[in-house]
Amino acid sequence: MPDERSFGRLETFSLLAVPNDPIFEPLTIRHLTLKNRILRSNVCGRFDNYDGTGTQTRINWELKFARGGVGAIISSFVPVTIRGRIVPNYATISSDDRVPFWRELGRQVQAHDCRFILQLSHAGRQRDVPGIEFAKGLSSTATPEPLHGFECERMSLDQIREAVQAFADGARRAREARLDGVELHAANGYLFTQFLSSAINDREDEYGGSLENRARFLLDVVRAIRAEVGADFHLQVKISATEYNDALIKTEKRGNTIAESKQICQWLEAAGVDAIHVSTGSFFPHPRNPAGDFPLDELVKTYDTLISSGMLALRNYLLLRGRLTGAVFQQRWEHARGDRDKIQGLTLPDARAIKEVVRIPVFCTGGFQDAPAIRAALTSGACDAVSIARPLLANNNLVELFKNGLERPPVPCTYCNRCLVNAPENPLGCYDETRFASREEMVREIMTVFDPPPFR
Ligand SMILES: Cc1cc2nc3c(=O)[nH]c(=O)nc-3n(C[C@H](O)[C@H](O)[C@H](O)COP(=O)(O)O)c2cc1C
Ligand code: SF4
């Protein structure tokens, strides 16, 4: 069995199915049973309408993974308010009229014996493309986000109360849509991180300062959701266990440590949370999430989408286009990521640390792609399930491949992150041309998400 350090170097192929494979052992969480230990991690493209109503394209997207055999799909971020959007053209759950769309999407996914968990989210200040409705995002702070310069307004106590209610309403709507549960997006730099983080939260009221105060907003939301939907609706929280907030800008504070996150997870468990989903990084994207390459050539083609969003985005765009400055930025990013061989299971030590202090199941995200690595993560007791985004994007049928005895996909995800940098501008899909016979074949595959079309 491989240890955590050898995850990236596995080259195993075996055509014999593993008996009593832990990957295919069902997982029962308090109110939810998954048929196996692989969840599709949160990922989607700009497939919906500008106003946040959902489309057939989003349904087509989710069905690709439901058909591929994952035990559950966790949706990409679903804003609970329009102001809490990260970019337009993602379906929201911000009003009751959104319920029928989510019910239909859930019904079609569940028909494949796949559970559907909706990620309730609020961008706070981290809005890549804010849209036309609100100029500034809301946050725990009035300080703009330091990398792109997204401006924001410090939330008043009334605005915090409204946000708490918006999350509770979102959970109620997910339940009315007969979905299998909700996840709070308390990771990767969005509004919950902006409250939790010792590096970002500079409030002096009861929502800032001590860890207890910084965790108050998230815990208020958990309690409000429980009051709204009762004790038997699945509720999990995605958290950035270690923040590495100074990964790119050395003058920034480091942010929350694993010791602080362990305490937060214990409070979440006590407040009625059913599972913890472990991620990393106090902003998104972050060198360690999704950990991979910095595809500079591709990024300069799409970063222009952000130019009018943040005060520093034009500066960044010009730096990225400069041969020397672009190369320096690329080097700094990949240095902060660390060893390329260790991408698979990068967050596992944090998951293990959290698992040691809670009784509820722990899911781990970050680079998982090979069956032996996933088995080792499960059997070592570091986590109860893994969530996968990019390797499933590259091979929608990854779980079926494992079931058929393959230990590793024949044409694996290369962690090139071209999907990531295309996401703000182009349809989401795998953009690594080396994985396809030709560029035309790659584009054809990306465009399959539009089939079937909304009108025939
Ligand atoms: C294009 C893209 C979009 C993502 N969107 C979200 C999101 O909406 N919510 C979230 O919690 N994580 C999001 N993630 C992070 C993934 O869910 C996942 O945790 C991360 O990519 C690490 O897993 P992987 O190595 O399997 O890709 C996104 C990742 C990518 C590449
Ligand atoms: S573009 Fe394809 S190969 Fe590259 S990280 Fe994304 S899914 Fe993986």
Image: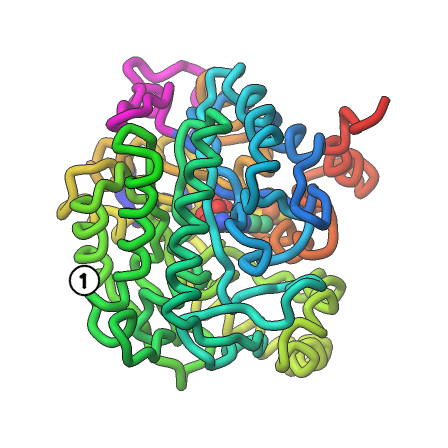
Question: Residue 396, can we see it?
Answer: no
Q: Quadrant of residue 60?
A: top right
Left or right? Give the position of 115 relative to 375.
Answer: right
Which residue shows up at 58% across the image and 45% down it?
A: 92
Q: Nearer the viewer, residue 260 or 23?
A: 260
Location of residue 107 in the rendering, given as x and y in whole percent from the top left corner: 55, 20
Q: Which residues are magenta?
A: 13-37
Quadrant housing the N terminus: top left
Q: Disc 1 on helix, strand or loop?
A: helix
Which residue shows up at 54% across the image and 73% down it?
A: 331
Q: Nearer the viewer, residue 392 or 414?
A: 392
Location of residue 400 in the rendering, given as x and y in whole percent from the top left corner: 50, 20
Residue at label 1? 259
Q: Quadrant of residue 37?
A: top left
Location of residue 94 in the rendering, given as x and y in whole percent from the top left corner: 55, 46
Q: Nearer the viewer, residue 388 or 306?
A: 306
Question: Residue 164, can we see it?
Answer: yes
Q: Is residue 449 above or below residue 318?
A: above
Which residue shows up at 23% across the image and 49% down it?
A: 268
Quadrant housing the C terminus: top right
Which residue shows up at 40% across the image and 66% down it?
A: 158
Mainly helix, strand or loop, the magenta region? loop
Seen as rendered, the residue at the extreme front is 158
| Mark 1, other Cα within 10 Å: few <14 / some 14–19 / many ≥20 | few
Left or right? Give the position of 149 relative to 88.
Answer: left
- The magenta stretch spans residue 441: no
Give amino acid for label 1: Ala
